[in-house]
Image (spheres, coloured by chain):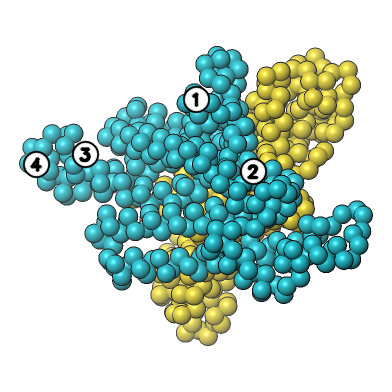
Chain colours: A cyan, B yellow
Amino acid sequence: MLRFALKRVLGAIPTLLVLIALAFFLIKAAPGGPFDTDRRLPPEIEANLQAAYNLDEPLYRQFGLYLGGLLKGDFGPSFQYRDYTVTELIAAGFPVSLRLGGLAMLLAFVVGVAVGTVAALKQNAFTDHAAMAAAMIGISVPNFVMAPLLVLVFAVTLKWLPAGGLGDWRNFVLPVVALALPQIAYIARLTRGSMIEVLRADFIRTARAQGLPQRAVIIRHALKPALLPVISYLGPATAAIITGSVVIEQIFGVPGLGRFFVQGALNRDYTLVMGVVVFYGVLIVVFNLIVDLVYGWLDPRVQYQ
Amino acid sequence: MNAATKTSTIRGRALSTDVWETLKKNRAAFVATLLLAVMSVMVVVAPILSPYAFDATDFDRISVGPSLSTLHLFGTDALGRDLFVRTMYGGRISLMVGLVATAVSLVIGIAWGATAGFIGGRSDHVMMRIVDVLYAMPFMFFVILLMVFFGRSIVLIFVAIGAINWLDMARIVRGQTLSLKEKEFVEAARAGGVSNVKIVLHHIVPNLLGVVAVYVTLTIPQVILVESFLSFLGLGVQEPMTSWGALVNEGAQEMETAPWMLIFPGAFLATTLFCLNFIGDGLRDALDPRDRSN
């Protein structure tokens, strides 16, 4: 197990390097620099600016310096918000995004597994078809269509919930639901598929033959193996929720990291955009790693080679 | 002699026939296909029939609701532009992105996967390891980076989205190639002196098409979704051109006063994705040997 874990951790390092390098060299390849203005700056000032941001060093040195900074948690200065470093902006936005995304993930997992299990138990009955049709709609209606529709119905028309901003829990309901819906749908479909397969397995028949009640069969025997595909989907789900949070924060005016990212993208704040990409990228890679390790721990069939 | 005439009466089943038969049996997928076909034709033909241009302002009717008498079937937007025609134009962009970007990912994916699977050994290992590494990347963010740094051109959208979506395709194609290359007909071709390149192109790739078809129908909605996501954020197609994502964004800002601006483009986008997902699911149930849940 330890060797397996170590191997996976070491395996994630090239992925991280490629990720950071991709982001870094994309920026360097971009036409135009951050200090290009209509007015030509005096050469001395330009040289000083270049030196201040290490832009006068050779490319590989710049990359090395950026990597070194990252290891210390330093993402460099923001090009647009002159008084802030990218690290400060990430520290300001991420807790909000984390709360939003974490709640959405929790909701997606609990509701998705519940719906999927019920659908599997009623396979081909009305409940099953209704649940799977709803899941198909959940997958097909994009976040950014669903979110304004939810606002239109629950905030504008019914006036039950606020349309956005930060405040108490009620401000979080619509964004969390909008963010979670597609993932609920995916997880429900996954759970249904694997649950149907598990319920046909011999050990379930054995459990039933021993006279165990349905509830015990499902919870104690079927649920764990049926959840394995769901567990391995949690990695991609995290990536999807992080991506989704970019638009959801935009729509609901939540001051999270996704909103900084979009603002940065529209303002051409190169360092901020790159910082967010690297930060979220590392987060996704690390989360995938954790999911991998948990999966290996849960599923005895995985061989630790 | 007799045996020869007998075999000649057995007609081959083309993949297209197979797919068509499958679709007819699955009623939901069949309806989805028809609906999609109707929408595609509409998107191409309907703007020609409307008296309004997609970027022309109707100064007398700014932000008015849907009405038959003025022929603003879906109403107008805040600049007085006809929303029906704009929705159709947006659909052209969305569907075109779906097809072109999928084609890009198809070419890369098949080339990469078939090569890795056919060569095997260490090259295969290295090539699939590269796929693994790329798989872990948050690609949506990289597409956004590309859009920010290199301008928002439609060609770049095609290439960027296509270039990030080939990983699944490569994995599937490689897996199939690994098993196909052990088959007798490949051995026969090799014994007949056919070159490796020709074996891959003429014997392996045609046999992959069934599985590939499934993933093509599942890739198209993903690609459309990515494009509309970008356009929604203002990073995709630029004004006065439009796409469904951009229209939904405008609609979301005006929804309290002009809900039709949100509802029509949103409905078209969602219906298209819904149809494509249904078709993909139907095809997978019928064609994918690995799916055991049904």
Eyeballing the image, is A99 above or below B263? below
Q: Chain of mark 1?
A: A
Of callouts 3 and 4, which one flags the residue occurring earlier in the amino acid sequence?
Answer: 4
Q: Position of residue A266 (x, y in %)?
A: 73, 45
B68 or A91, nearer to the observer? A91
**Label whose residue precedes the other's in the sequence (1 or 2):** 1
Label 3, label 4: how many angstroms apart (C-alpha)? 16 Å
Q: Chain of mark 4?
A: A
Mark closer to the chain start, 3 or 2: 3
Q: Nearer the viewer, residue A261 or B54?
A: A261
In the structure shown, which secondary structural element does the residue marked by tag 3 occupy?
Answer: helix
What is the CA distance from the residue labelled 1 to the residue labelled 4?
Answer: 51 Å
Distance between mark 1 and mark 2 Cα atoms: 22 Å
Which residue: 53% across, 48% down?
B218
Residue occupying image coordinates x 55% and y 58%: A73
Q: Are marks 1 and 4 on the same chain?
A: yes
Disc 1 + disc 2, Cβ < 8 Å: no
Identified at 75% across, 28% down, the residue is: B84
Work out whether mark 3 precedes mark 1 in sequence or the reverse, and give the earlier one.
1
What type is the residue that disc 4 sits on?
A: Ala
Residue B227, given in percent of the width and then of the height, sits at 66, 46
- B205 with respect to B267 (left or right): left
Please name which of the two marks, 3 or 4, marks the residue nearer to the observer. Answer: 3
